[in-house]
Image (cartoon, rainbow, N blue to C red):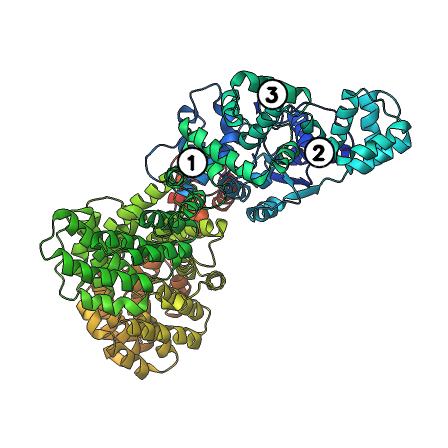
Amino acid sequence: MAAHSSVQSQTATELIGRDWELSLLVERARRASPGAGQAVLVRGPAGIGKTRLLSAVLNELEPLAKTVLSVTCPEGRSTGYETVRGLFEPLWRTGDGPASSPLLSGSARLALPALLPHTEETGPADAYAVMYGLHWLTAGLSADGLVVLAIDDIQWCDETSLRWLGFLLRRAEDLPLLVVMTQRTGADQPELLDEISDALGCLTLDLPPLTADAVGDVLHSAFGVETAPAFVATCTDITGGSPFLLQRVVTRLRAEAIPPGVEQVALLDELGRCVVTRSQLDRLPEDAYAVAKAIAVLGGESIEMTAALAGTRPGPAGIAVEALRAQDLLLGDGVDYAHDLIRQAVLDATPAEELVALRRRAARLLNDAGRPAEEIAVQLMRLPGDPTPWMVGVLRAAAASAEHRGAPGVAARYLSHALKHDPDDVGLLAASGKVLAQSDPAKGLEHLERALGLVSDPRIRSQLVVQYALTSLGAQNSLRAFALVGETLDTIDAELGENPDPADRALRTLVESVYLLSGLDEKSTVEAVSRRFADYVPPPGDTPEERQLLAMLSSLGTLKARPAPEVAAQARKVLDIGEIAPGGWAVLGSSLSLFLADEIDLPLRALTDLIEHAQGRGEAWTYVLSTSVRAEVHLWAGNVGEALSDAQSAFDVMVQEAWAPTVVMPQTALAGALIRRGEPKRAQDLLDLVTRPRLDRFAIEYHHFTMARARTRAALGDLEGALTHLLHCGDSLAEAGIDNPVLAPWWLDAAEALAGLGRAHEGLDLLERVEEPVRRWGTCRALGMIRMARGVLTAGDSGIDLLIDAVNMLADSPGRLQQSRAEYLLGRRLHRRGDAEGARERLRRSIDLAVLCRDKQQLDQSLPALTEAGGRLWHGTDSPADALSGSERRVAEQAAAGATNREIAESLFLTQRTVEFHLTSVYRKLGIRSRLELPAALMRV
């Protein structure tokens, strides 16, 4: 299908002097057609012929493309996704609108807030989710063949549409897609254009002025006679080779019946560039000129609205419009100018004060007509000075509409303008802080800080502080938030009393949970949180606020190594309900407590629900975070393959979104799985990607990262380097007051390193630091790990007895990786004592567990040890599925379950080309030819 907006509605004229550019753009379309996305940015000054070239290109591509969509970005429009709506609007012209379109199925449905002409009051849309949905709408269109998206005057494109274009182009390598954009040079350019021009190796094409020969061809085509070289030279000179200006010259000469010739050279010199519009405008009657100015301000409005702004009636306004159309100033049969140069000439000729008055009146007229707030805000944003109260109301409504579209940046600009009326408007400051949390959290915190300085009411302050704390998590600096929440709690206790009403009690509970959330984020505040909640009686968990508080209390108890059954009981109350609150913090906090307490199934189910929730809503950040945590749970449970799949999936999305410098968990989780897969060098390379500022200040992420560093060094044979990281991890945990021995079991790895370095006495001293919290935490795994550490460091039969105790204790836990390690260490010690038969038995158990866990690192040590003890394997240890990478395994599992390539790509936030690439690799590694053979191949052991 071909669907166009204003790009092709211009009067068709012969394209002269652009043959090379036209052939180049058609060739780019041919390259894109097989599924190799292409982008072209055509640049040049106003009037150089960008739009005419674009129109010619689209005509040439009609036979080649299945879908052609085009739009012209209107100058001065800043509503959220306005360009996107204009681009896709032709798709719904024959139906009931986008809401009922079959094109919006699956993840494409997430695009709906951007496509509806008016937003529904259903809550703010996630900006990433909307862009993700628009990507899948485009991908769905491309399933039938080449899709061409043409955006004219992209320098005026609204910010959210620009962000989406960059988002799309980063994922377009595998799509039959051509994106052609035109950009006017010489004007202010949005910074986002740089991102777009860098995407897909975007071709930038600068249009030069027409040559004298091309100008001669235009004149010959217009007048049907050869023109004198002097006349051609003068035309070239006064128009600068601009096709638009040249066309205006031709129009003027024709209108006045002046034949081209040498005798007209002087006339052309006299006309100069005024031939464009000014001379025509000067000849207009006063009432027609008023209509011309109204059109310049409103552009594209009805005759009735244009007449009202011009101060006349529709009848006379219609006559004025016909006069303007007769002079070739208007576009087709519409009420808008044929070119922005004409509009600008009208605006330039209008005195500044009159123009301001016209814009103010236009805003009033649109408001009185009941137009959407975003349309009115376009005019308000162009007015100088501070907005009046009625304008503030419109800007508030426009901001809410933009937020519901998933355009927080646009909403923030509306609110910023509204704040000029009253910089101390607490409601506006709070709303601005909320929308800025997505795009500029530091600026959002400034607005919230100002609001807090203006409010004394404890209830309003509490709500602002909660918002401040959650925004601080995004800014990765919770210290100020922690102090504010603490002060707020003190105030609530003093002013609300011991028996607050249910609403106040819920608010206080929410503030307490946020206090815990912000206080457990960084190391320096963990002890303060612990002191405040030392004798706290946990709530029953009957409300969402209470359950979130319970989740945070279980996290605190976990860090402080309170008995595992106690914290697990609190976390269980949260996850048993099955609700998913915004951000997923309750699920994530409870899952941490439960899996470290060796309750695996419930957190896995809860995290899976959270992941599916994120997939359904297109929330990539929540997906990355929850998938990384689930990878850690799988690894803790001894499922290296599952851990690798989850961690690789999170990592792939992180790389695709360019989040690597500030994100830690995907790299840490993937590095842990890769070490077990026997790939420590790759793990080291991943960890080297982390450059997050202040990483060493954070309570959980930093210690997981440090443990991954240490284990990577140990796997590479650098025991001293590993020990340095491990000892630092222990000191950092102690400094923060984090006591849990299994959160980051540095002491177990340090014991092995010190034993290998012949410094067992140092290791025994280290274990004294963790013995008490190990017993307090009390899980079979923790108790087995401390025995294994002591056994490694203790010589003779006493050490062997400790290792036997460790194996027996770990066998009663889900700690299969630790059990496999303990069996290996015990087998080595038995062999050295001369008990070869006992050694072989233990080493075979170690191998069986390692095979079950897909722990190649342990296999690479246990297999040679078994051979050294005179044993041999009774069965193989390899599975073809072991050769699969994490991403390949996850893709293969979904394909085996019957998911299509598109469904797999949508759920994993990948492109279809990436899915196809992974499946091709899977077939080769498993020795199969189709997805029908996948289920059996994946089950082979």
Distance between the alpha carbons at the discs numbered 2 and 3: 25 Å
Residue, disc 2: 49
Distance between the alpha carbons at the discs numbered 3 and 1: 52 Å
In the rendered structure, the answer to whether residue 63 lies left or right of residue 902 reads right
Against 739, residue 271 (above or below) is above
Q: Position of residue 167 (x, y in %)?
A: 51, 43
Against 890, residue 813 (above or below) is below
Residue, disc 1: 903
Residue type, label 3 = Val
**Residue 69 can be seen, yes or no:** no
Q: Helix, strand or loop at disc 2?
A: loop
In the rendered structure, the answer to whether residue 822 lies left or right of residue 923 reads left
Q: In the rendering, which numbered label is found on residue 81? A: none
Upstream in sequence: badge 3 or badge 1: 3
Q: Helix, strand or loop at disc 3?
A: helix
The quadrant in which residue 671 appears is bottom left
Q: In the rendering, which numbered label is found on residue 321? A: 3
In the rendered structure, the answer to whether residue 17 lies left or right of residue 351 reads right
Upstream in sequence: badge 2 or badge 3: 2
Q: Position of residue 637 (x, y in %)?
A: 29, 56
Q: Residue at x 47, y 60 (%)?
A: 686
Q: Quadrant of the N terminus?
A: top right
Tell me if mark 3 has few (under 14), some (14-19) or many (20+) residues whose alpha carbon lies within 10 angstroms of its own. Answer: many
Residue type, label 1 = Glu
**Residue 105 can be seen, yes or no:** yes
Q: Position of residue 849 (x, y in %)?
A: 32, 58
